[in-house]
Image (cartoon, rainbow, N blue to C red):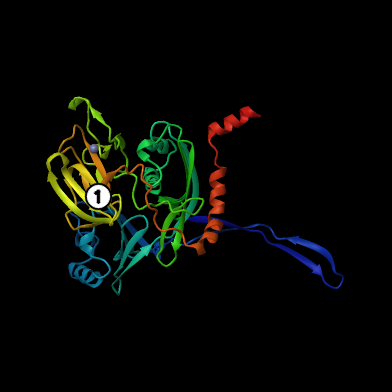
Amino acid sequence: MRRIAYFLVAVFTIVSCSKEKKKEVVVPEIKEEIKKPLIKFGYNLDNYFIVKDTVKNGDSFGQILDENGVEYPVINKIAENIKEVFDVRKLRAGKEYTILKSKDSSQTASVFIYHQDKINHKIIHFKDTIKASDFKKQIKIVEKTASGQIESSLSKAIDDQGLSYVVSNELSDIYAWTINFFALKKGDKFKIVYEEKFIDDTIYAGMGEIKAAYFEHGGKPFYAFNYMPDSTKRYTEYYDEEATNLRRAFLKAPLKFSRISSRYNLRRRIAYYGNKIRPHYGTDFAAPIGTPIMSTANGVVVKSERRGGNGNYVKVKHNATYSTQYLHMKSRAVKVGDVVKQGDVIGYVGMTGNTSGPHVCYRFWKHGKQVDPLREKLPAADPLKDSLRKPYFHYIKPFKEKLDSITFEKEVLEFAELK
Ligand SMILES: [Zn+2]
């Protein structure tokens, strides 16, 4: 890259004894071309011939180096020497690589750079000495804000704003315990403060964390702020504006996106059974066949079998009080005795047993009796330590102000009409 630098030098001559400016001399502009060396991956690329290519199906490290003039005994030595850092058999088709060759007539290859992704690179140096190292590009994080309103679905609202689908997944994770994402309403709104990652200042490298979010569901506001409750453990949690952990011991639903097709109802009458009362002890979540079913809380699998009307089902015991059960699976992904964490996939939606369509019948047991989980006041996860409340409120203040300053077009219009 060539850059032109302008030098403008002004020289003042001051007669010191009289302390008065006598003469001002302006030296004319000097234009000078400065060529900035192109340093990448720690090498001055101006000193090399550069070969850039992509690993093709069937390509091997040996074959690529061979084609670039490295002899097989040398290639074997390289592979052997660097295997601790980089297994050359792991080159994957579709990944890019760069080879640096000397600029003399021999054009000897001396560096192989494997680009694992936009950020991570392996550098294999084999001139004089052989060594391999990891090279991580510097990432610049830019904070951004976005907002949207739900007309038909959250994913459409997110798409309309030009946001990544990752945002809808993240939002559904953040609010998995507080908002029924399977029952969003038209007019629900969201605002987020999030991060975007860039390499070399300009290359987009994906979304970072959602630092703060606001979700208005059915007219009710739900704030969420990302905060590290324990700096030694390096994990973050989302808390609301009152420092309450948004995470609960149980998820609201065993599926990420779905709708409730039938609620827990002890007085349900079914025409098929002559309008007799056939209580429904579960909550049915309809979703396409094959949709992953998650355990709604940490626990141990106590049943995983196929039986009668339940079809393929799994039962998880969470503690002395609670167990949950998931029916009509297409297939089960866990066996009795498996330890599962909240959100772990335990099976897939199907229609085995007594069912007229693909859904999961979610049954919630409390002290051995089936209850309605949507009406239960479920235990919250770890609260924020008292000593962290003050720093937390201090930390979230600018984020809350930022969220509150985002207005929706409609609100602005209404405000304008009022004036
Ligand atoms: Zn059911």
Picture quadrant of residue 253: top left
Name the residue at 16% across, 50% down. Answer: 304
Q: Residue 214, image x and y in percent?
A: 48, 44
Above or below: residue 125 compared with residue 149: below
- Of 406 and 352, nearer the camera is 352
| Residue extending farthest right | 18
Picture quadrant of residue 45: bottom left
Q: Amino acid at mark 1?
A: Gly
Q: Is residue 307 left or right of residue 160?
A: left
Q: Residue 297, image x and y in percent?
A: 30, 52
Q: How many marks?
A: 1
Q: Is residue 329 left or right of residue 25?
A: left
Q: Residue 109, image x and y in percent?
A: 29, 65
- Find ligand 1 in the image and state its quadrant: top left
The residue carrying mark 1 is 368
Picture quadrant of residue 153: top left
Above or below: residue 128 compared with residue 340: below
Q: Is residue 13 left or right of residue 35?
A: right
Q: Quadrant of the C terminus?
A: top right
Above or below: residue 323 compared with residue 230: above
- Of 347 and 290, nearer the camera is 347
- Describe the element under mark 1 as helix, strand or loop: loop
- Of 392 and 121, nearer the camera is 392
- Of 223 and 354, nearer the camera is 354
Q: Is residue 227 left or right of residue 182?
A: right
